[in-house]
Image: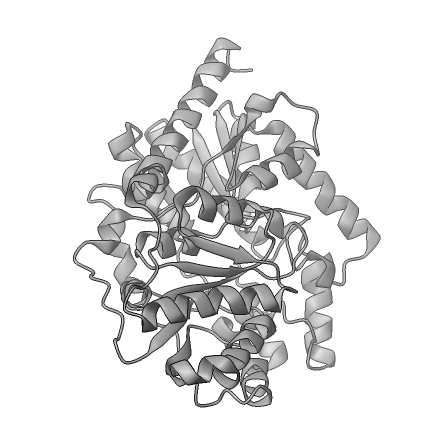
């Protein structure tokens, strides 16, 4: 949500006037109404009806619409109804459960285009069915940029979907059709750009990295004041699994030689959605007194949590193609000024970003010794009154949402110029 919201916020400053097309009442795991203030005055927001498969899913599984969105991709369906609902979602609504919105969106976009012609169309996925709207409008002659926040058939949960071979074939065919037809494809990282580009025979210029980033305005007036009586390693956002390496490192530091330096003041704070299995793991490692779980908080409170941490924890799950995973959260971590301690691919794009900005270190998931050493170094530096620094401010300028939106605006203009040069065909 933040990526497209910040595009809408800053495109006008980059010389592109946006019109937003979305649904009237979508189903989401969480809502943060305050972020609607980021939509600039005068930006048109068009809302259309759409089928609501999550309401049906919720009725079948005894959940609310919001719970259905959050739970639909759990690794272990709870019962026969949930397994059946997941099979339907995987095989009868390709590419995803939001595909029913496509005809409504195409009709509304065409109506708006007739009333006030657009120069180009930008679609953002997932849900990747949104790109089918762009493909339809490109057939009408509009230049089209397809923005990928995550991969399509390579997304991390894809193998957990009970897809039949025909459904997989149809989904991959749609993916290739989008990658081939879009005038430009934007991707959040270099690794994922290469992953998508390898699926079609197109010139390299058709694919561009438009990174996630941070909105400098979100950090105005937010001062980082970590507590002085304890060192808190804070994770903000959704945890998708149990961070066992982190818990092991924390347990080691609290029970071994570090205890003499008061390592009882070393804490882990988890802010946001945390799987139930984490509580069991915390108990298993004897860390109940050292770990605090805070439920979901709005974005402005999340920013304050980042700024008030001793260090920030980044957990990149052991997913396929995780080397290209660079979340928007990481850029906000860097902007907070706090150092980042990460777990994930040490040769991936996130690790490269941390090295480039001086924002922290990323350790392999199986390197508990290395993680213990990194966390211990931060704790002991703090205990000695000389906490380690976070990212260098001068190296963050290219990664503001404003700067990355300007990059997107250039890509849009390139698509328009190239289409006009080819005569609109």
Q: Quadrant of the C terminus?
A: top right
Q: Position of residue 422 (x, y in %)?
A: 53, 10
User: Residue 181 sits in which quadrant?
Assistant: top right
Q: Quadrant of the N terminus?
A: bottom left
User: Residue 318 sits in which quadrant?
Assistant: bottom right
Residue 71 vertical placement versus 25 (above, below): below
Residue occupying image coordinates x 73% and y 39%: 173
Q: Position of residue 3 (x, y in %)?
A: 40, 47
Q: Left of 9 or right of it: where is 414?
A: right
Residue 90 vertical placement versus 267 (above, below): above
Residue occupying image coordinates x 49% and y 43%: 124
Q: Left of 292 or right of it: where is 195?
A: right
Q: Left of 34 or right of it: where is 260?
A: right
Is residue 41 visible from the viewing direction of this image? yes
User: Which residue is at the front of the view, 291 or 80?
Assistant: 291
User: Which residue is at the front of the view, 103 or 30?
Assistant: 30
Identify the residue at the far left of this view.
221
Residue 184 vertical placement versus 375 (above, below): above
Residue occupying image coordinates x 29% and y 45%: 393
Q: Position of residue 336 (x, y in %)?
A: 30, 57
User: Which residue is at the front of the view, 298 or 361?
Assistant: 361
Q: Position of residue 135 (x, y in %)?
A: 57, 33
User: Which residue is at the front of the view, 44 or 283?
Assistant: 283
Is residue 48 visible from the viewing direction of this image? no
């Amino acid at each position: 949500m933040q990526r497209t919201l910040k595009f809408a916020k800053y495109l006008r400053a980059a010389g592109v006037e946006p019109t937003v097309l979305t649904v009237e009442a979508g189903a989401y795991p969480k809502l943060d109404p305050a972020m609607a203030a980021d939509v600039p005055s005068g930006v048109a927001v068009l809302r259309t009806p759409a089928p609501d498969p999550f309401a049906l899913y919720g009725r079948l599984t005894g959940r609310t619409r919001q719970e259905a969105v959050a739970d639909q991709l759990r690794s272990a369906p709870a019962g026969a109804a949930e397994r059946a609902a997941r099979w339907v979602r995987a095989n009868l609504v390709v590419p995803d459960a939001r595909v029913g919105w496509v005809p409504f969106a195409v009709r509304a976009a065409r109506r708006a285009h007739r009333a006030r012609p657009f120069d180009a169309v930008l679609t953002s996925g997932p849900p990747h069915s949104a790109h089918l709207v762009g493909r339809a409008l490109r057939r009408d002659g509009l230049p089209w940029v397809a923005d990928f926040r995550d991969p399509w058939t390579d997304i991390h949960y894809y193998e957990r979907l009970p897809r039949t071979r025909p459904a997989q074939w149809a989904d991959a065919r749609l993916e290739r059709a989008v990658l081939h037809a879009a005038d430009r494809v934007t991707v959040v990282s270099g690794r994922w750009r290469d992953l998508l580009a390898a699926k079609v025979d197109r010139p390299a210029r058709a694919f561009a990295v438009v990174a996630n980033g941070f909105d400098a305005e979100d950090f105005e007036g937010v001062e980082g004041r970590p507590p002085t009586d304890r060192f808190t390693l804070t994770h903000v956002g959704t945890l998708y699994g149990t961070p066992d390496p982190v818990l092991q490192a924390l347990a080691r530091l609290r029970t071994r030689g570090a205890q003499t330096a008061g390592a009882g003041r070393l804490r882990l704070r988890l802010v946001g959605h945390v799987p139930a299995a984490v509580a069991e793991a915390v108990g298993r490692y004897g860390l109940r007194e050292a770990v605090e779980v805070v439920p979901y908080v709005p974005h402005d409170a999340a920013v304050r949590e980042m700024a008030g941490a001793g260090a920030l924890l980044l957990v990149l799950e052991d997913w396929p193609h995780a080397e290209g995973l660079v979340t928007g959260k990481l850029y906000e971590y860097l902007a907070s000024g706090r150092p980042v301690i990460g777990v994930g691919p040490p040769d991936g794009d996130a690790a490269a970003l941390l090295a480039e900005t001086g924002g922290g270190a990323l350790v392999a998931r199986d390197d508990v010794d290395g993680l213990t050493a990194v966390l211990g170094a931060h704790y002991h530096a703090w205990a000695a009154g000389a906490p380690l620094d976070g990212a260098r401010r001068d190296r963050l300028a290219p990664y503001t949402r404003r700067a990355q939106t300007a990059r997107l605006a250039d890509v849009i203009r390139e698509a328009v110029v190239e289409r006009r040069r080819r005569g609109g065909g």
